[in-house]
């Protein structure tokens, strides 16, 4: 959901990321495109190495967002909800690996 306003350079996204967090303007659309590419990589079947990179990228993005908000002094009420998305991503990663494991047969 956050990638579309970043790609379209919506004024609210620019104000928050550039003015509040201090990121350069060119970074906003760039990170939005990377988020869309990450979503595509996770949803397309196959390509396990690319999926691993996409999950890693989302982890860096989410933890970086939390750190950025803590660094500028935002209260927990502003960044605490991000852990919901971190847990969702961790759950998705866990179940992706559970699904990709080969089935084992127990003959006992």
Image (cartoon, grey):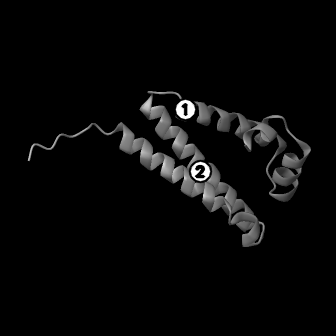
Q: Secondary structure at mark 2?
A: helix
Q: Secondary structure at mark 1?
A: helix
* Badge 1 density bin: few <14, some 14–19, many ≥20, Cα 10 Å: few
Q: In the picture, residue 105 is in which quadrant?
A: top left
Q: On the image, numbered disc 1 is attached to which residue?
A: 43
The residues tagged by marks 2 and 1 sit, at their Cα atoms, a distance apart of 19 Å
Find residue 31 and report its horizontal and vertical position in percent.
71, 40
The circle drawn on residue 72 is none
Up/down of 19 relative to 72, above or below:
above
In the rendered structure, the answer to whether residue 24 lies left or right of residue 42 reads right
Q: Nearer the viewer, mark 2 or mark 1?
A: 1
In the rendered structure, the answer to whether residue 62 lies left or right of residue 90 reads right
Q: Which residue: 49% across, 36% down?
A: 51
In the rendered structure, the answer to whether residue 38 lies left or right of residue 5 reads left
Label located before the other in sequence (2 or 1):
1
Q: In the picture, residue 33 is in which quadrant?
A: top right
The single residue placed furthest to the left in the displayed view is 108
Along the viewing direction, whichever of 46 and 22 lies nearer the viewer:
46
Tell me the quadrant of the picture where the N terminus can be found. Answer: top right
Q: On the image, numbered disc 2 is attached to which residue?
A: 60
Q: Which residue: 51% across, 39% down?
A: 53
The single residue placed furthest to the right in the displayed view is 11
Could you tell me how many numbered marks the image carries?
2
* Badge 2 density bin: few <14, some 14–19, many ≥20, Cα 10 Å: few
Q: Which residue: 43% across, 42% down?
A: 96
Up/down of 17 relative to 36, above or below:
below
Find residue 26 and report its horizontal and vertical position in percent.
80, 39
Find residue 23 and report its horizontal and vertical position in percent.
79, 50
Find residue 71 and report its horizontal and vertical position in percent.
73, 66
In the rendered structure, the answer to whether residue 25 lies left or right of residue 50 reads right
């Amino acid at each position: 959901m956050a990638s579309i306003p970043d790609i379209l350079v919506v004024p609210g996204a620019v104000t928050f990321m550039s003015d509040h967090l201090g990121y350069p303007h060119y970074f906003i659309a760039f990170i939005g495109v990377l988020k869309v590419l990450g979503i595509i990589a996770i949803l397309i079947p196959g390509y396990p190495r690319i999926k691993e990179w996409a999950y890693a990228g989302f982890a860096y993005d989410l933890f970086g967002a939390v750190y950025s908000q803590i660094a500028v002094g935002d209260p927990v009420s502003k960044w605490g909800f991000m852990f919901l998305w971190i847990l969702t991503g961790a759950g998705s990663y866990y179940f992706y690996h559970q699904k990709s494991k080969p089935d084992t047969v127990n003959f006992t």
